[in-house]
Image: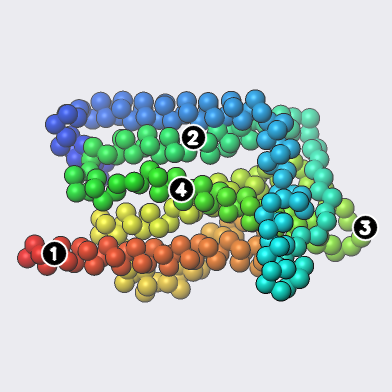
Amino acid sequence: MALLDFFNKRNKNPEAEMSFIDHLEDLRWHIIRSVIAVVIGAIIVFCFANFVVDKILFAPTRTDFISARWLCLLGHKIGIGDTLCFQQVDVKFLETTMTGQFIASFTLAFIGGFIIAFPYVFWEFWRFLRPALSEKELKRTRGIIFWVSALFFLGVAFGYFILTPFMVNFYFNYKLSSQITIMPTFSDYLENLIYTTVGIGVLFQMPLLVMLLAKIGIITAKFLKKYRRHAFVIILIAAAIITPSTDPFSLTIVTIPLYLLYEASIMIASRINKNQKKEEEEWS
């Protein structure tokens, strides 16, 4: 019923009087164009795979990485010495299968293509949903493509510049015995990097999701405040899932910004609820 109601709303647009099958065909072309955009981005990344791997993918593993240098400088500025400085680590990766690097290059290309094409993919998604919205709803969601893309790239940047260097430095310096040599596979590193970039980029959409749910009346600021403790547990679980490690340090790095986003979501929901209450009073 919800799907039919959605398509009925799309039909309210006089310029979009289409049948259910026509809407499915419309959706199919939105998906096809999105896939084409991702493939184009993937081809670009694949053509420069060697550069992407050496200069971008492996950059967080080096002590001269830009965020590593900034954190070290910050530590000296605030008077805590080398506490935030990364130790020198000789990071090497291996592959245990003949096809490992070949398959990983396609994974890298696809993920890179998705990141590059993300604003366009969401724009296609938004074009499909837009006819179902009223003029008032369209005004309220003005700039949504920018904010969704900005939060996604902010999450990706946080995972790449902050979380990944800490993760690599922590694990390569963690020693149970001098006889143990750490040499993970390249595929393992790539998989972890995907979790700590794309995964966090998706989780950074929390404020916009809350804004949408608050506007359609599913959740309120009062509800979010009441279940704040429960939300913290859920955030902690989500951080544990997207964080390749389960050590308290890495979990803390991921949990703090996610919880701050939750608090920001409460503020957004509170503002929306106040505006809705004001409109109801004016209407009555």
In the displayed structure, would residue 189 be above or below residue 270?
A: above
Q: Residues within 10 Å of mark 4 (few under 14, many from 20)?
A: some
Residue flagged by tag 4: what amino acid is it? Ala
Residues at marks 2 and 4 touching, judged by CB atoms closer than 8 Å:
no
Residue flagged by tag 2: what amino acid is it? Ala
Residue flagged by tag 3: what amino acid is it? Gln
Q: Label for residue 280?
A: 1
Instruction: Decide if residue 167 is in sight here.
Output: no
Count of marks overlaid on the render: 4
Distance in Å between CA atoms under marks 3 and 2: 45 Å
> Quadrant location of residue 246?
bottom right
In the rendered image, the quadrant that contains the C terminus is bottom left
Residues at marks 3 and 2 touching, judged by CB atoms closer than 8 Å:
no
Q: Nearer the viewer, mark 1 or mark 4?
A: 4
In the rendered image, the quadrant that contains the N terminus is top left
Mark 1 element type: helix
Q: Label for residue 117?
A: 2
Residue drawn at (83%, 56%) of the image: 88
Q: Residue furthest left?
A: 284
Q: Label for residue 179?
A: 3
Query: Upstream in the sequence, badge 1 or badge 4?
Result: 4
- Can you identify the residue that label 4 sits on? 150
The picture places residue 259, in percent across and down from the top left corner, at: 49, 66
Mark 2 element type: helix
